[in-house]
Amino acid sequence: MKTRCEISSLNIESQQILLKIVNISLCLNSRVICCTSKYLKSLAESGDSYPELFYALEVNSISVPPLRSKGNDILLFSQHFLAISNKKAHRDITLSRNMYNAFLNYTWPGNIRELENTITYIVEQSSIDEVDLDVEQLPSPISLTQIKALTTIWNMPKKNLIIQALNEFAGDTNSKTLIAKKLGISTATLYRKLAKYEITSAPNFK
């Protein structure tokens, strides 16, 4: 039998009961798995945790690094959860480079569960005609982190960048796709930018 609990959410009385269960489990073929997002020793020293429980659990404690310390592994987790969400929603959604950059720069206080929920959210909230998602689809506060923390190509004059890209790829039949890729945005976002800046063509932009 396996039992899981968040220690910091238990009052002292419940922690005393848990200690008894832990001691009993040592005599039985069972394990009590306890977890906490807080430093257990600090809780014990502050009086918020039952000291005897801390010493009983410290013997077999495992420290799990927070998601924000995983570096580029965050991208692997993101792609994994995206594949799962796509399958459930019968979609074939992809994420922009800017969105992945936002994931890398966000602190993820909710760790892996927050990342999973974020991916699920943006897939389920996207319009049926959207395939390539950009940071505009991100929930707060991740989108705010993207705006404040990242220095991207969009920090340059946006209209001028789009026109320059239009000139560069004007002769290609897949110009819009190539331009979006060059700018690190989705094609849907590109079309919204074109409409916003009233750009219909870009002959010989200087």
Image (cartoon, rainbow, N blue to C red):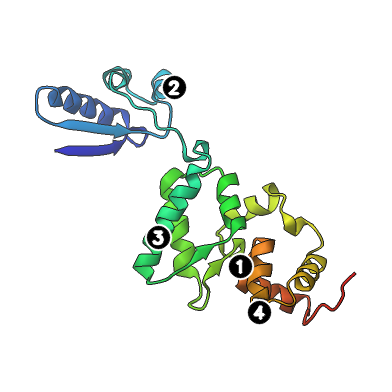
The residue carrying mark 1 is 186
The residue carrying mark 2 is 42
The N terminus lies in which quarter of the figure? top left
Question: Badge 3, how many Cα within 10 Å: few under 14, some, many 20+?
Answer: some
Residues 204 and 98: in front is 204
Name the amino acid, label 1: Ser
Q: Earlier in the sequence, mark 2 or mark 4?
A: 2
Picture quadrant where residue 21 is located:
top left
Q: Earlier in the sequence, mark 3 or mark 2?
A: 2
Q: Secondary structure at mark 1?
A: loop
| Count of numbered tags | 4
Picture coordinates of residue 135 (x, y %)? 60, 61
Q: Earlier in the sequence, mark 4 or mark 3?
A: 3
The residue carrying mark 4 is 173
Between marks 1 and 2, how big is the CA–CA gap? 46 Å
The residue carrying mark 3 is 83
Q: Earlier in the sequence, mark 1 or mark 2?
A: 2
Between marks 4 and 3, how big is the CA–CA gap? 30 Å
Picture coordinates of residue 91 (x, y %)? 42, 71
Between marks 3 and 2, how big is the CA–CA gap? 39 Å
Name the amino acid, label 2: Ser
Q: What residue is rendered at 79% in x and 81% in y?
A: 201
Q: Are marks 3 and 1 in contact (CB under 8 Å)?
A: no
Between marks 2 and 4, how big is the CA–CA gap? 62 Å
Q: What residue is rendered at 55% in x and 42% in y?
A: 107
Q: Are marks 3 and 2 in contact (CB under 8 Å)?
A: no
* 10 left or right of 195 in image: left
Between marks 4 and 1, how big is the CA–CA gap? 17 Å
* 154 left or right of 77 in image: right
Name the amino acid, label 4: Thr
Question: Badge 2, how many Cα within 10 Å: few under 14, some, many 20+?
Answer: few
